[in-house]
Amino acid sequence: MIGKTSRGAALGCALVAAVGCSEGESDLFPVGSGESSTVAQEHFLRRLHLDLTAAAPSDEEMASGKKRLAEQGNVPATRGDIAAELMESPQFAELFVSELENRVFAGQSLDDAYGFVCATIRAVETQCNEGCDPADPCACDCPQLMPLVAERETLRGAPDALVTGDTGTMEVERLYGSSMIVQFFGGSVEGIADTLWQNFLGRPAEADEVRNARALIFGSIVEGTPAGLLFHRHGATYEDLIDIIFTSEPYQDAVVGGVFQRFLGRPARPAELIVFTPTAASAGDVRPVAQAIVSSGEYFGD
C-alpha cells in the first residue's frame, strides 16, 4: 500500500532515460516545471481529479490545490502529495474496482454478474428456488449458491479494503481473477485461459500456455506431481495456475504497463518497466507507480 507520499515518491527519477531529472529539484521525482500558468494548473487539477476519482474537483478542492501549488511550488513533490491523498480516498478505490469489474465481467457490475450465475444455477438445480429473496437471485437456502454468496461478499468489500490498507490493488485483481465468475464465463479451458491472459496479462495466451493451463485446470493425474509449467514454475492444480499468474513478472509488467497506458496514453518503455515493476511487486500495489506518473512533467504537460 502507498503511504502518504513516501512509497511512490522515491520511484520517479530512477527513470532518467525515460523522463529525466532536473538539477536543483529533488532526485526523488520525475522532472516537473517549477512555474506554470494558472490555467495550466487548473487543467492539471481537473485532469488529476477526473483520472483518480472520476469526478471534477469542487470549487473548494480547486482553490485548495491552486493554493498548495502556489505556496509549495508547482513541483513533482507537491503534485505527488495531492495525488497520494486522492488515491487514499473511497472515490479512488471505487473507481479502481469498477474499472476492474467492467474489464473482467465484460461490462457487467459485480451484482449483475453474480445474479446471472446464480439464476443460471437455479434454473438447473430446481431445489434452489425455495426460500429465495426476489430482490437477490443469490439469496436462497441452497448449498450450491453459498460459495458464490461468500465470494461476492468478499469482492464487495474490496473498495473498503483498499482504503483501509488491508489489501493492495494487485491482491484485489487476484481475487477477481480467481473468482468462480471468471471460470463460469470462460466456459471452456481455452476460454478461461483467454480471460485470464487478456484481462491480467494484456495479451492472448500462446498455444503452449493454453496447453499448460489446461493441464493445471484439470489437475495432476498423480497427486503431488506437476501437471504443467508456466513462467518457469511447475504446478498441479487450478489454484497453482492462479498463483503462478499473479506472482509472475509478466503479470507485474502488465500491471505497470496498464498504469502508463491509463494515465499517459502510451506503453511503458523498457527502462520504465525495469524500475517500476519490482517496486509495484514489492508493494503489491500500483498506486506508487501511479503517483510517480501523475506527478511527472509529462503528465502535467511540460
Image (cartoon, rainbow, N blue to C red):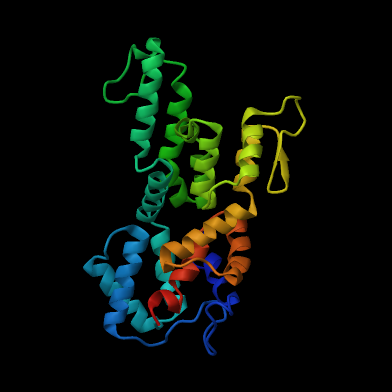
Decide: is 47 above or below 167.
Answer: below
Q: Between residues 195 and 237, which one lies in front from this camera angle? A: 195
Q: Observer-nearest residue: 161 or 36?
A: 36
Residue 168 visible in the current orientation: no
On the picture, is 35 further left or further right than 206?
left
**Left or right position of 39 against 103:** left
Q: How many marks?
A: 0
Quick check: 274 above or below 68?
above
Residue 111 spot, x, y in % from top left:
35, 34
Can you give x and y, in whole percent of width and height, for residue 124 in the image?
A: 40, 15
The residue at the point 28 percent across, 76 percent down is 42
x, y percent for residue 55: 28, 60
Residue displayed at 50% across by 66% down: 267
Query: Which residue occupies 53% across, 52% down?
Result: 203
Q: Is residue 232 above or below residue 257?
A: above
**Which residue extends farthest front?**
207
x and y percent of residue 302 in the render? 40, 83
Front-most of residues 64 and 126? 126
Residue at the spot 61% in from the left edge and 68% down from the top edge = 275
Regarding residue 241, the answer to whether it shows in the image is yes
Which of the two residues, 50 or 121, is positioned nearer the viewer here? 121
- To which quarter of the image does residue 213 belong? top right
